[in-house]
């Protein structure tokens, strides 16, 4: 397989020769890790702790991997002479990618929470700010900006909100002349770094009315953009040895898992994970041999294809399980390993359905025309 990413064609298993399927697969695995984080947090159970401990403890850091991956892929797809100047089309493509499933899951969660509270006289499940005001914020993808009172409705969609805002800022910046674009992006990154150094990567702080998670997203996204530029200008030219790249990816994963399983969350460790481990994993996945082979196995590639649905569907499914337990007055065996495995499989199954019935048709309707070959970015979300 050809190793240079931008100036030579890559052999692919699909009709998208420029798509890096190994990154799709990484996003899928990260989404499943986030399920583990929310499973223990929302259900209060931690089955298979010897396997899932890193995700139970600090799986929220995987959202930052989505941000880094998003920056890398969107810079690769959009920051070029053909696409960077088409701001309106680029923003439309991001709306088409993110919005249909976001709205569908928002409505599904709103209905189930309403039934839970108004018909079953039960407290809302996990997220309590489910009023009309927060519904409007979610509709406008402003549900994690500083305007909200807290997490609401499909809570994990907070990262969809911050990523969409950062995507628009990025697309607006690269539509400017190249030198001005670089200054604008560097300025955004510098401001986000200052906010994070003051408040930490993961914080409930609000700076000048802006939620810290906006700066968190800019920081991760900026790391991804920088990585893309470094790759296209240097790494793709010198060509990393595949054995070294495999070792880099394995070391990155090992460092992340050890930190999450054994370490104590701190601002310096979090920054090291985002700046070092996540970029190393992306580069190792692209240039490695064994790691690439594993990540381009068809089942993993398919999971990567539906990973946005996996991410947005796991909380609605958790809510549906809780709703069923209230309706039938039964205690679900959340601590059972088979129940966890079944929940993950059910989430994948539901995601496959929503991908084909909501994501793909919704994207086609909103785009209204066939996009350019690189108009289908790999990242979303992450989120």
Image (cartoon, grey):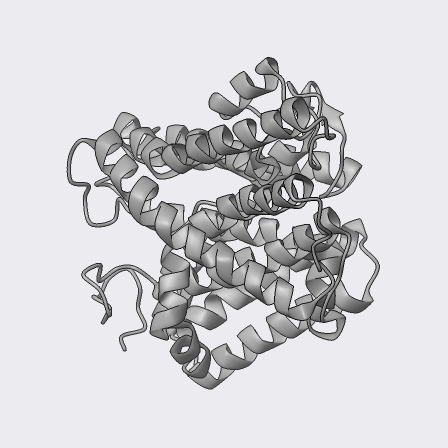
Taking 233 as reference, is 41 above or below it? Answer: above
Out of 277 and 30, give the one closest to the viewer: 30
Q: Is residue 328 left or right of residue 360?
A: right
Q: Position of residue 120 (x, y in %)?
A: 67, 29
Q: Residue at x 39, y 79 (%)?
A: 293
Q: Kindly indicate the quadrant of the structure image that contains residue 45.
A: bottom right
Q: Position of residue 282 (x, y in %)?
A: 49, 64
Q: Position of residue 117 (x, y in %)?
A: 67, 25
Farthest residue toward the left? 369
Taking 141 as reference, is 380 above or below it? Answer: below
Q: Residue at x 42, y 72 (%)?
A: 295
Q: Position of residue 61 (x, y in %)?
A: 66, 53
Q: Is residue 71 left or right of residue 366?
A: right
Farthest residue toward the front? 328
Taking 204 as reference, is 299 above or below it? Answer: below
Quarter of the image where the N terminus is located: bottom left
Taking 268 as reference, is 138 above or below it? Answer: above
Q: Is residue 69 left or right of residue 205?
A: left
Q: Residue at x 34, y 63 (%)?
A: 20
């Amino acid at each position: 397989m050809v190793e240079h990413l931008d100036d030579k064609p890559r052999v692919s298993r699909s009709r998208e020769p420029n798509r890096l399927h190994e990154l799709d697969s990484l996003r899928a695995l990260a989404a499943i890790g986030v399920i583990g984080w929310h499973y223990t947090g929302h259900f209060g159970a931690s089955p298979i702790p010897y396997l899932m401990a890193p995700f139970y403890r600090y799986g929220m850091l995987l959202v930052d991997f989505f941000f880094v991956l998003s920056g890398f892929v969107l810079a690769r797809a959009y920051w070029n002479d053909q696409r960077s100047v088409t701001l309106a089309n680029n923003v439309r493509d991001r709306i088409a990618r993110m919005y249909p499933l976001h709205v569908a899951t928002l409505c599904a969660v709103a209905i189930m929470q309403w039934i839970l509270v108004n018909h079953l006289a039960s407290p809302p499940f996990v997220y309590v700010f489910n009023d009309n005001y927060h519904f409007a914020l979610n509709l406008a993808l402003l549900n994690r900006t500083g305007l909200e009172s807290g997490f609401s409705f499909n809570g994990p969609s907070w990262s969809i909100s911050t990523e969409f805002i950062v995507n628009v800022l990025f697309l607006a910046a690269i539509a400017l002349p190249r030198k001005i674009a670089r200054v604008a992006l560097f300025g955004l990154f510098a401001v986000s770094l200052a906010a994070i150094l003051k408040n930490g990567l993961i914080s409930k702080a609000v700076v000048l009315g802006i939620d810290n998670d906006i700066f968190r997203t800019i920081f991760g996204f900026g790391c991804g953009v920088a990585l893309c530029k470094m790759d296209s200008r240097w790494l793709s030219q010198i060509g990393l040895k595949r054995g070294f790249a495999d070792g880099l990816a394995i070391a990155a994963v090992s460092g992340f898992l050890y930190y999450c399983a054994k370490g104590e969350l701190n601002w310096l460790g979090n920054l090291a994970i985002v700046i070092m481990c996540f970029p190393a994993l992306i580069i190792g996945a692209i240039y490695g041999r064994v790691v690439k082979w594993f990540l381009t196995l068809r089942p993993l590639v398919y999971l990567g294809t539906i990973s946005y649905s996996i991410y947005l569907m796991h909380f609605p499914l958790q809510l549906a399980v809780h709703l069923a337990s209230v309706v039938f007055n039964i205690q679900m065996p959340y601590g059972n390993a088979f129940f966890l495995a079944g929940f993950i499989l059910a989430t994948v199954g539901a995601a496959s359905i929503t991908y084909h019935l909501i994501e793909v048709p919704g994207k086609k309707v909103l785009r209204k025309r066939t996009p350019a070959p690189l108009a289908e970015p790999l990242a979303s979300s992450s989120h």
